[in-house]
Image (cartoon, rainbow, N blue to C red):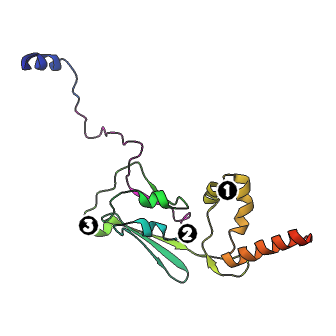
Amino acid sequence: MNILQIILKNAGKQSRTRKPDDRVPFPVDFRGELSHNALQCTLCGTCTYVCSPAAIEITQEDDMGHWDYDAGQCTFCGRCVEYCPTKALSFLQNSTPLANNRPQQKTFHVVEYQKCTRCGTKIIPLAYETLVHLYHSEEAAKKAVEIHKLCEKCRNRLQSQTLKSGISGSRD
């Protein structure tokens, strides 16, 4: 087939060029803009540990913690999303917004501490969605919500009391 035949064959067909508003759909596992759900985040630091370019930084103060992300440093490797134990991080199915300067590439979120319902120690309890994921059941997660509003020390104390009353047979 010579070039003239190819040109004549293609002349009768429609254009295959996309218009600017006709966007190419993103693939299923596209690593677009990083999304952080501050309500599910416990500031555990796993994301900062696995982020080799140090695009994520966590700072903790007396009454709140800060989760800071710099898209300009991010390589979109996905390790932070993969290793986040509470699933607070995810990639959106859109490309990262264009930034004209460095401050536009940064995201700052505040994660506020809550008080332990027994002793008042500042904690970050697990979100209900995270409990459902961990317990694999909404019924079990509903029971665990109150326990996870306690600090680690009070949870251990409660578990010890439950174990002790189970062994001794008393019902406190």
- The quarter of the rendered structure image containing the C terminus is bottom right
**With respect to residue 31, does 159 lie above or below?**
below
Query: Disc count in the image?
Result: 3
Mark sitting earlier along the chain (2/3): 2
Magenta segment main secondary structure: loop
- Can residue 21 be found in the magenta stretch? yes
Residue at 44% x, 69% y is 49
Q: Residue furthest right?
A: 170
29 left or right, relative to 11: right
Residue 167 pos. (x, y %):
87, 70
**With respect to residue 37, does 16 lie above or below?**
above
Mark 3 lies on residue: 101
Rendered image quadrant of residue 134: bottom right
Give the magenta range: 17-41
30 left or right, relative to 9: right
Residue 42's disc is 2
Residue 66 pos. (x, y %):
47, 74
Q: Real-space Cα distance between discs 2 and 1?
A: 17 Å
Mark sitting earlier along the chain (1/3): 3
Q: Residue furthest front?
A: 167
Q: Real-space Cα distance between discs 1 and 3?
A: 43 Å
Rendered image quadrant of residue 117: bottom right
Q: Pointers 2 and 1 in contact (CB under 8 A)?
A: no
Mark 1 lies on residue: 135
Q: Secondary structure at mark 3?
A: loop
Mark sitting earlier along the chain (2/1): 2
Category of crowding for the residue at label 3, using alpha-carbon neighbours closer than 10 angstroms: few (below 14), some (14–19), many (at least 20): few
Residue 32 pos. (x, y %):
37, 52
Residue at 87% x, 72% y is 165
Closer to us: 1 or 8: 1
